[in-house]
Amino acid sequence: MKIVVVAAISEEVKIMHRTMPWRAAIVALTICAGAGAAAQDAEDKVIATIGGKPVYQSELTFAESDLDPQFSRLPADQRTAAALSALLDIKLMAQQAEGAGLGKDEAFQRRLSFLKDRALHNEYFRTKVVDGLTDDAVRARYEQEIAATEPEQEIKARHILVDSEEQAKAIIADLDGGTDFVELAKEKSTGPSGPQGGDLGYFTRGRMVPEFEEAAFALEPGSYTKEPIKTQFGWHVIKVEDRRDTPPPQFEQVADQIRRVLLQEQYLALIQEARDAIEVEVTDQDLQSLLDKANAQGQN
């Protein structure tokens, strides 16, 4: 069941992105904001003053978490210095802006209100969901998906690809005479897997072109096709070496993916809870039409 949980969860994520792409983006923003925010110390140390106003350690910590990703390659002390420099620049220019009266500008106040609302949105989601999502909950969902999903069957196969039916028939004759399949593939196959003895590894249904897949899955382990198989790529001789149920992915492989799904589910549940409690009215009919159209397209 190598991709069962991955496939199931990936499809769920795709559905959420199709139905509510902007909400999926907000969830991503929320998760990033929640991960980057640092807890403020009970006694937040003053690390500098600008114009007599204090600058706190918590602000430096937040500034460091908000650095461009390129700074992650720097040593820790250089990252701290870069964050401190950026923080001081921000504080200096903010004081200049206040002195110029820009903080009283109506457009600025609306933007500030939006930023406050977004920060509260993120904080609410962090406290209600992110902080409470435990590893045990993620593992429980993993085990639920494993138990609920039927394993697929997969086969391990090799093939020899040639340009004509006559060449393929000659290869089958050589195999009937006892020639080793791997050596023949290395010598005769024109496909990219030829140097590896035609090895295709394990694959499930739906991974190969239909003609190839039908012939391969009809074979028992240890057997090869007695007639050449024609596809768009040429003529194939196929040998199946093993048949098994696909093994499930390890928890560690899909834990982050499951966590994202759970966060999205709980985010949408919080949104629905809020909509049930608070009336939302879009008074601009053109915007309401755009919203209705986007929702309808997302559900198709």
Image: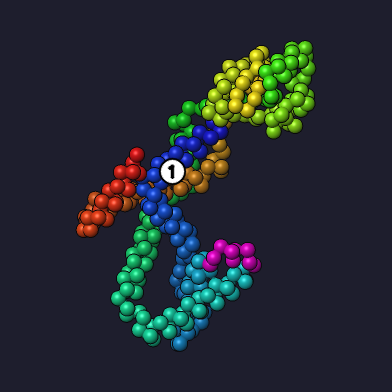
Chosen colour scheme:
rainbow
The amino acid pointed to by label 1 is Val
Is 137 situated above or below 156? below
Can residue 16 be found in the magenta stretch? no
Question: How far across and how far down the image is residue 245, in percent?
Answer: 56, 25
Residue 273 visible in the displayed image: no
Is 11 situated above or below 64? above
Question: How far across and how far down the image is residue 182, in percent?
Answer: 75, 24
- Label tally: 1
Left or right of 27: which side holds 68?
A: right
Image quarter of the C terminus: top left
Helix, strand or loop under label 1: helix
Task: Report the residue at 51% width, 73% height from top.
Answer: 60
Task: Report the residue at 43% width, 84% height from top.
Answer: 96
Question: What residue is disc 1 on?
Answer: 13
Question: How far across and how far down the image is residue 299, in percent?
Answer: 33, 41
Question: How far across and how far down the image is residue 294, in percent?
Answer: 32, 48
Task: Report the residue at 61% width, 21% height from top.
Answer: 230
Is 125 situated above or below 213? below
Task: Report the residue at 74% width, 16% height from top.
Answer: 170
**Relative depth, front residue between 141 and 205:** 205
* Segment tinted magenta in the rendering: 67-75
**Relative depth, front residue between 200 and 272:** 200
**Relative depth, front residue between 196 and 260:** 196
Left or right of 122: which side holds 213?
A: right
Can residue 69 be found in the magenta stretch? yes
Q: Label 1 neighbourhood size at 10 Å, few (<14), some (14-19), many (20+)?
A: some
Image quarter of the N terminus: top right
